[in-house]
Image: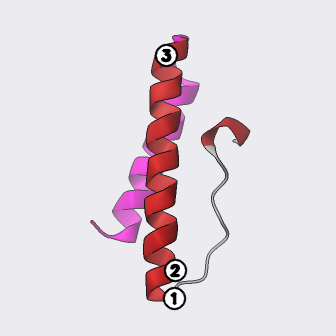
Amino acid sequence: MDLNELYARHQTSLIRAADTDDDSERDRHNAEADAMASCIEERRIARGARAAPLLPAEQV
């Protein structure tokens, strides 16, 4: 999976989290977004790609 796909999945998880009224579903989507952010960060660093760090989902 390339960085663009990871960024897209991260954004989709944040949108889904913001779009639900169910707390457990929101937590699940935020956890998915945080996992994607960690994966993005690891791959970004490994490739030497410069980018602003992603915030944890609760802070978005």
In the rendered structure, which amino acid carries the disc numbered 3?
Ser
Whether the residues at callouts 3 and 2 have beta carbons within 8 Å, the answer is no
Mark 1 or mark 3, earlier in chain: 3
Part of the protein shown in magenta: 1-22
Q: Which residue is mark 2?
A: 45
Q: Is residue 53 above or below residue 37?
A: below
How many marks can you see? Answer: 3
Predominant secondary structure, magenta span = helix
Q: Is residue 20 above or below residue 53?
A: above
Left or right of 1, for residue 45: right
What percent of the width, then of the height, locates residue 45? 52, 80
Mark 3 or mark 2, earlier in chain: 3
Q: Work out which residue is located at the far top of the displayed protein and give it.
A: 22
SS class, disc 1: loop
Q: Residue at x 60, y 82 (%)?
A: 50
What percent of the width, then of the height, locates residue 35? 45, 49
Q: Looking at the figure, which quarter contains the C terminus?
A: top right
Q: Which residue is mark 1?
A: 48
Colouring scheme applied when the structure was drawn: secondary structure
Q: Work out which residue is located at the far bottom of the displayed protein and give it.
A: 48
Q: Which residue is mark 3?
A: 24
Q: Residue at x 35, y 60 (%)?
A: 5
Compute the Cα span from label 3 to label 2.
Answer: 32 Å
User: Does the magenta segment cover residue 41?
Assistant: no
Residue count near mark 1 (Cα–Cα under 10 Å), binned few <14, some 14–19, many ≥20: few
Q: Is residue 36 above or below residue 2?
A: above
Compute the Cα span from label 1 to label 3.
Answer: 36 Å
In the rendered structure, which amino acid carries the disc numbered 2?
Ile
Whether the residues at callouts 2 and 1 have beta carbons within 8 Å, the answer is yes
Q: Work out which residue is located at the far left of the displayed protein and give it.
A: 1
Q: Looking at the figure, which quarter contains the N terminus?
A: bottom left
